[in-house]
Amino acid sequence: MTIKKAVILAGGLGTRIAEETSVRPKPMIEIAGRPIIWHIMKIYSHHGINDFVICAGYLGYIIKEYFSNYALHMSDVTFDMVAGQTIVHRGYAEPWRITVIDTGAETMTGGRLRRVQEHIGDDHFCMTYGDGLADIDIRALIAFHESHGHDATVTRVLPPGRFGALDLDGDKVVGFQEKPMGDGGWINGGFFVLSPKVLDRIAGDATVWEREPLEGLARDGQLFAYEHGGFWQPMDTLRDKRHLEELWEKGAAPWKVW
């Protein structure tokens, strides 16, 4: 089994971080000067996946404009205004093939996936959300998916705690924990590997991927969970964004595997 494509859901409204999403789609919110979707793509690219299908929606033209000018942004250039020329002195861009599809402003997560069916093809593929970072080993995830031979793999993660915690000895504070892990319950962390057959479980635009399709896969014994016990962090709020930026600035960004 050869898996070459990653689908990224990037069309939601991002209402919980409206301070940023009033002017850009959530996956275009920047961490360390690059959109979070770029960081996600770099994770996949490090593990050999360079063909991306982006399910755009709300303000999707901003995603298109970013990648249409990407090579120029990554280059040293001279703009000769008199001659009307642009001279590229040194350029670098990742070996990416990026397909951006407008999947509708109001379409649900399952509907977005169904709308890009023709760009997925007949092979198994990766899929994730456009707002979550992890130091996940994509190659190991794919190998796990291949080993069980069923239709779907979801990455299970332990969510980070929202607040720091006190280490107590009775009533005495003896230390602090920064954002301890959650209550022990594994959750859906994205980073799926899927057979194209799962698309048949999506009725239309109103289908939520996490409801009927995933629940049906689980009921039919077709959904397996890959355990990722390392770093995982969604960017749901400004607090999350600041946390990710602080990790990068400290040189301690676990997802920076490239």
Image: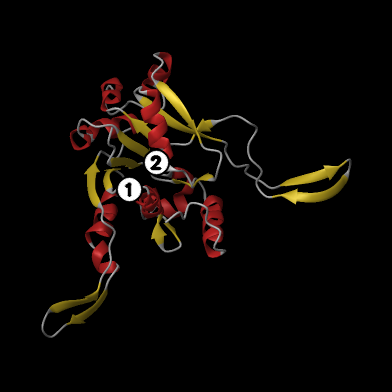
Residue neighbourhood size for the residue with mark 1, other residues' Cα within 10 Å, grouped as few (<14), some (14–19), many (≥20): some
Question: Would you identify the image quadrant in which residue 1 lies?
Answer: top left
Residue at point 30%, 27% (across, down): 195
| x then y, percent, for residue 117 | 22, 32
Whether residue 117 is visible: yes
Q: Closer to the camera, 229 or 99?
A: 229
Q: Is residue 157 rendered to the left or right of residue 118?
A: right
Residue at point 38%, 43% (across, down): 13
Q: Is residue 115 rendered to the left or right of residue 182?
A: left
| x then y, percent, for residue 168 | 83, 43
Q: Furthest residue to the left?
A: 83
Residue at point 79%, 45% (across, down): 167
Which amino acid, by three-letter code, is at mark 2? Arg
Which amino acid, by three-letter code, is at mark 1? Gly
The label on residue 161 is: none
Q: Is 167 rendered above or below residue 158?
A: below
The label on residue 48 is: 1
- At mark 1, the secondary structure is loop
Q: Which residue is mark 2?
A: 139
| x then y, percent, for residue 17 | 47, 48
- At mark 2, the secondary structure is helix
Q: Closer to the camera, 193 or 173?
A: 193
Q: Is 116 rendered above or below residue 25?
A: above
Callout 1–callout 2 Cβ contact below 8 Å: yes
Q: How many marks?
A: 2
Q: Closer to the camera, 237 or 161?
A: 161
Whether residue 25 is visible: no
Residue neighbourhood size for the residue with mark 2, other residues' Cα within 10 Å, grouped as few (<14), some (14–19), many (≥20): some
**Mark found first going from the N terminus, 1 or 2:** 1
